[in-house]
Amino acid sequence: DRVSFNTVISAFARSSQNQGQNAERLFKELVDLFEASSEERFRPDIVSYTSLLNAWTRNGNPTGAKRAEEILLQMQKDYKEDASNTKPNTVCFNTVIRAWAIRPNEGGSKRAEMLLRLMEDMFIAGNDDVQPDTRTYNIVLHAFANGQDEEDFVKAQLLLEHMHEEHRNGNAIVKPDTVSYNTMVMAITKHCGRDSLEALEDLLQDVYQNDDIEPGTAFFSNLINALSRTSEKGAVWLAEGIIEDMKDVNRNGTVWLAEGIIEDMRNRFENGTLSVKPDVTVYNALLNCWAKSGEKTLAARRAQDILEYMQIKYEAGDSNLKPNVQSYTLVLDALAKSRLKNATETAEGILEYMQECHRRGDSSLRPNAHTYTALIQNYARSELPFKAVEAQSVLNRMKADFEAGNLGARPNTIVYNAVLNACEYSYGNDKVMQEAFRVACTTLDELRASTYIKPNHVSYGTFLGVCSELMPKSDVRNEMVELIFRRSCAEGQVGRIVLKKLREASPSIYYELLDGFSEDKLPMKWKKNVRERT
């Protein structure tokens, strides 16, 4: 009967291959049985349809959103022609809208908006079963946040305001919530880019001015992480009721806004106007903001102060502020960018402390690949003469840790590139330079021989930089440069850094190696595997 069919269709929705096609084939059998027998026990019901829609929209099926929309619209057409047929409801629409929301390259935001408008029109016409709810609007907000059209951010803002207006007018099932505001943070980050400071502050004020919104710690950590990606400095921030000490125009406006947000959270929690207080995720977001602030020495010192504060609070009984591996790794990152003379010594001390805590049973402080990479970057940016050797030593310790069972410490291409970077920027006497070149060759060979990772354009570009900095100009250097460039071509890894470093390393053979191609019209096979930030 129908229940048996629904159970199997639902199972197909949870499978990993051809779930849409398999579910629809079974659904068609159910329809055929009903049409042949006219028995109600075979008539597809709302569970049949929602299971079928789920089968098409789960697991990133490339044609799933389109097919699910076709099924939904056919379902609506069948109901209009015969009211005894199953009537689509809000869950059906939400399922299809969600499928479009994650497909920005296929015009997903437009399709999601179209379906929302259809729901609203149907509801106004008297169909209470398709009333859009908070979940519906949040999914469409997500579609706009993911969208690629210039107007998508404005549409997201207008939709959030519409949700507020609906709620103010008595619509109890439409109320902006923490998901709505977290999605708006994502929209600001995607569409406003590095000029998003004002939009983020406006959003925070909107949250505070709406008494019926209960933002969680995830909202604040997302907000602060978004602040870390902005580039505005020196602004005079007078965020009303939030920040009182931001009038120094020489400060980084972004990071002090983040500091102010957390201070305001504490104050609001203590006076009872906010139900959540800053936890480790919020403080980690602040550490991330400092690490990316560009404040160098100030950032490193402030990051260490914040970490110490978290540790003191934890030892005093606040378990929500216990620093974790991300906390310590972010401090290592801030130290690496500080250029402090004792940065490497401090960073080594932090890693040693983490390892000791892990040996005593604290699994939350076991160093991972990010931790080791940050320590290597401390050496790479230091002025130590044998920093390449020290960076390689950290890599070897990382490999030993991984082989001892720490799966989170598996070396990746990024960590090998960090060692190569330490080699490229080594300087000193002949022995220093020779050792740095030896480490670079060993590191690249090891990376190329790996069974689970491979060099990328940064690896080859950095090694070309090694040739430029550590090898004297000669035919031997040109031969090495040509070998590395040929390898990067063969592996589809000719990115901008490869071209830049090639030109610097061997300008005399640069155009010869390009084989008549210009930089902006290279063969696709030379660059097919390059993944560069735009």
Image (cartoon, rainbow, N blue to C red):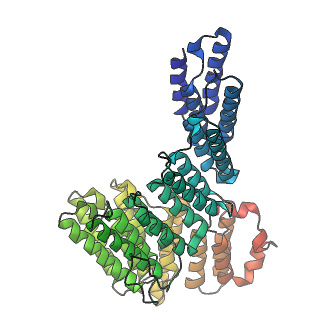
Give the residue displayed 61% in from the left and 32% down from the top: 88
Placement of 368 over or under 242, stated as above or below: above
Percent across and percent down for residue 189 are 55, 66
Quarter of the rendering occupied by the N terminus: top right
Q: Seen in the image, is 324 located left or right of residue 157?
A: left
Give the residue displayed 38% in from the left and 64% down from the top: 398
Percent across and percent down for residue 151 are 67, 62
472 and 232: which one is in front?
232
Q: Residue furthest front?
A: 169
491 and 290: which one is in front?
290
Placement of 18 over or under 270, stated as above or below: above
Give the residue displayed 37% in from the left and 60% down from the top: 217
Q: Would you identify the image quadrant in which residue 307 lies?
A: bottom left
Give the residue displayed 67% in from the left and 32% down from the top: 76
Quarter of the rendering occupied by the C terminus: bottom right
Q: Seen in the image, is 325 located left or right of residue 359?
A: right
348 and 436: which one is in front?
348
Percent across and percent down for residue 140 are 59, 51
Q: Would you identify the image quadrant in which residue 517 lies?
A: bottom right
Q: Would you identify the image quadrant in which residue 32 lies?
A: top right
